[in-house]
Image (spheres, helix red, strand yellow):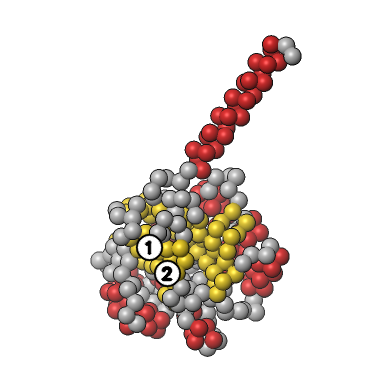
Amino acid sequence: MNRRKIKYQILGLLLVAAILIWLAVFSQPRAGLLEVDFFDVGQGDAIFIETPKGYQVLIDGGPDASVLEKLGQEMPFYDRSIDLIILTHPEADHITGLIEVLKNYQIGQILENGFKRETAGYKEWQRLIKEKNIPVKITQAGQVVNLSQGIKIRILWPDKTAVNSSPESSNNISVVSQLIYGQREFLFTGDIEKQVELNLAVAGIDLESDVLKVAHHGSKTSTNQLFLEKVNPNIAVISAGDKNPYGHPHQEVLERLKNVKTYRTDQNGNIEILTNGQWFKAATER
Ligand SMILES: [Zn+2]
């Protein structure tokens, strides 16, 4: 082997080493910080959570494939897996993007409420779960999912009777969950309406949370005053589409939230909240 060849081989090795180091640096999530992203996916919900150790959770996927682009912005290109998906309820504005996620990412586990729908979307969802052999767990109020480093997700709703009652709309059997890291809590409410909010408010469950994902895109049928008092949030996030046909968020809800710092995906774009378990800070795209 001549000297020149050796030189090129060493250069090659150094280049590979440099690339590996950069990959390791970029794959290291911000030290000690939990990140929660409320993606602007139009009229729907898609919420991405990443723990300091890099455990990733996606709650709902929005109404179309735009969630893939959002995930691409948050995750490095070589990360093709998500640890946990929570489908709050199988309506199109929550499940459609998740179907695209199932096609494009490897999924560790799925949590859903167990309510089966006869829609093409739900059938495709089930087909993909079967094809890719993804473990599915049916949520139960009272369940706790441990993520990492004491970070957990408490499932608060629905209970079995609610799911078995075969409701006309699945909004009121949306999976309601609370993410807890240190002193900070996030409450995710899917599309539940007043009756479930009241049910939770009087059940003696500790609902107090720093961040409230406002239920049902800010519809006036949700965000009841008593529920709001029990949650007592510092920050409210409304996920709604710009000029959506439902007029979400409704003025009444914005009125009820007047003393809470409120972010809206239709106005602020993507909303990112970071916390170290003590302090938290929010940043928005616009
Ligand atoms: Zn919805």
Where in the figure is residue 199, as x and y percent of width and height?
37, 83
- Asked if the residues shown at circle 2 and circle 1 are in contact, with their CB atoms under 8 angstroms apart, the answer is yes
Q: Between marks 2 and 1, how big is the CA–CA gap?
A: 8 Å
Task: Tell which residue pokes out farthest to the right in this image.
Answer: 1
User: In what quadrant of the picture does the N terminus appear?
Assistant: top right
Label drawn at residue 154: 2
- Residue appearing at x 46%, y 60% in the figure: 147
- Residue appearing at x 49%, y 54% in the figure: 55
**Which residue type does callout 2 highlight?**
Arg
Task: Tell which residue pokes out farthest to the left in this image.
Answer: 259
Image quadrant assignment for residue 136: bottom right
Judge left or right: residue 101 versus residue 202.
Answer: right
Query: Which of the marked residues, 2 or 1, is nearer the chain's N terminus?
Result: 2
272 vs 146, nearest the viewer: 146
**Which residue type does callout 1 highlight?**
Ile
Label drawn at residue 180: 1
Where in the figure is residue 285, as x and y percent of width and height?
42, 50
Where in the figure is residue 41, as x and y percent of width and height?
51, 60
Query: In this rendering, does residue 37 appear at all?
Result: no
